[in-house]
Image (cartoon, rainbow, N blue to C red):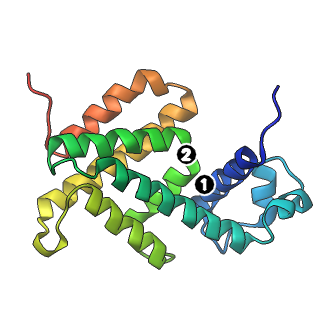
Amino acid sequence: MPRLTKTEIDAEIIDRAAGLFAKHGFEHTSLQQIADAVKYSKAGLLHHYPSKKAIYDQVLVTCLDQMRALLVKVDGIAVGRERDLAVVETSVQLSFDWPGISAFTNRLADNGEGTTPEMTQMGMMMYEALGIDLAALKLERLIRVTSAFSGLGVSAMIAARLDFKREWRPSIVQAAMDALGHAKAS
């Protein structure tokens, strides 16, 4: 088995920690839980990140970086079906590649206790990626977006866990597009 690079190790730590923060919140996630999730000792984990707060901060940076990459990807695509499809396909891939980060960003829909300015910024970036004008927000579009991406996140995480990524991907994409109001023409 090839040895992981520092970048790969750090990515695994961040993704696993993000999943734990999504499930338990920052306060109720311990360094030991994170260390156990990546099969490191607590001292080994602290060799990569000096504190739980440093790990959490890197989770936020990684989430924001992913959102920025999404914005770059859809820049220049007109608002509508094609742009929504690009956001959906990118989101499915993100959920497959970064299941912990995906679970963490799904907390955006909660928007309650534990919501940080960075999480609010991520939500605004997602609205921007989807071409949503907050000054002229339509309730139906907001509900469709929330339904589409909540369902997408859960379905993609289950597909990844069951190792059905390839088999489920087209259906996850189509279900999200249907929820967004872009039903496949018969």
Three-letter amino acid code of the residue under disc 1:
Gly
Left or right position of 99 against 86: right
Query: Residue, x 21% and y 47% (percent of image)?
Result: 77
Quadrant of the rendering where the N terminus is positioned: top right
Query: Mark 2: which secondary structure?
Result: helix
Q: Which residue is mark 1?
A: 19
Image spot of residue 134 (x, y percent): 19, 72
Q: Which residue is mark 2?
A: 99
Task: Kindly check if marks 1 and 2 are in contact, taking CB atoms under 8 A apart as contact.
Answer: yes
Q: Nearer the viewer, residue 98 or 77?
A: 77
Give the distance between the C-alpha atoms of the residues marked 1 and 2, in whole angstroms. 7 Å
Please tell me whether residue 147 is drawn above or below residue 116 in the rendered image.
above
Q: Which mark is residue 145?
A: none
Left or right position of 146 against 141: right
Query: Residue, x 55% and y 26% (percent of image)?
Result: 163
Three-letter amino acid code of the residue under disc 2:
Pro
